[in-house]
Amino acid sequence: MPNLCATTKPAASAPPVPLYNKHKSTENMTTQDKVKDTVREEAQRVANLASDAAQSGAYLYPIRGIAYFLAHRDLWKPLASKLIPTLLLGISTLAGVFVFGYLPQAAVLAVFNGPLAAINAALLCLNESSTIFNTLAKTFLVEESLIDTFDGTLVAKGEAELVSKERKVGRGGDAIGRLGKLVKKPFAKFAPSAIIRYVMYLPLNFIPVVGTVMFILLQGKRAGPAAHSRYFQLKGMNKARQDEWVEKRQGAYTGFGTVATLLELVPIAGVFFAFTNTTGAALWAADLESRGNDRQSTAQLRDQSKKAI
């Protein structure tokens, strides 16, 4: 007979499944989802910005700047005075970036972009050389020449009174010849924050096609307001007022800045386009002044009519 009093051993249970792998997988999934959501939100924001930029029509001002600059020979003087050293800087910067940066960047982008890596790497090198050139040229070579181009365009458009707030404006001669001594210089010198933002946006180029488009649009978003730094100074705007002004016209400034950025990416000719973009920015400023004066005149007439009644 079986011994009923004997102690029976419980059946061996299966070892517990470690939970950390499951938790880790869930955590990774969550992180991936967050990254995807962030990229999706940023893409949507950039798409909305691009739509606003297209509707504003401000993207046409860099093109208008080319036509106006070519048609007014007096505006060539500031560029002519700095042409040779600026061209040398542009050529050396472009050559240096492509010699030392193209192959390494193409190799990295090949992992993410496949056959498009060669094109994206070339665009990236053009953008990098443009950024380096603009930083160096506008800091050390053409700052005053660009200011003269901006002010000269405003004078040619009948906005001498606005320009006279920050420099003397003569009565005789062409638009550039009428410009007197500057009171102060508005363009910012080397700004580490701008370089940091540029580096932060670089990984967008790992996303095929769309990432490069987003990268250029974000560069344009920064370049647009920078093109009106002289206008803000002439209007006496402080930093808070500038931010408020730009925020209300973010799409317009992004549209202008994106086209201006693309033009300045053109090898060597980017030097020329830096001046035509400045001309376009001044044309835009002159139109803003004209519209503002028209609205003010309309408001004054309305008030006078009310008083007469």
Image (cartoon, rainbow, N blue to C red):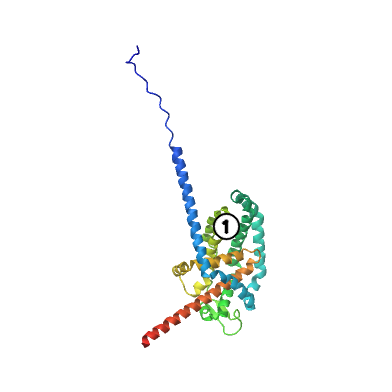
Q: Quadrant of residue 148?
A: bottom right
- The percent position of residue 201, horizontal first and vertical second, equals 53, 56
Identify the amino acid type marked 1. Thr
> Relative to 43, is 131 on the left or the right?
right
Give the residue at the far front of this rendering: 1
* Residue 144 appears in view: no
> Which residue occupies 50% across, 77% down?
289
Residue under the image location 62 percent in, 76 percent down: 75
Apparent side of residue 15 relative to residue 200 in the rendered image (left or right): left
Compared to residue 297, the image places residue 258 above or below, namely above
To which residue does mark 1 refer?
A: 212
| Front one among 207 and 273 | 207
Between 278 and 119, the one nearer to me in the picture: 119
150 or 252: which is nearer to us?
A: 252
- Residue at (57%, 66%) from the top-left corner? 259
Residue 15 location in percent, x, y? 43, 29
Q: Quadrant of the C terminus?
A: bottom left
Question: Residue 298: image x %, image y %?
Answer: 44, 81
- Which is nearer the eye, 99 or 273? 273
Give the x, y percent position of residue 251.
50, 66
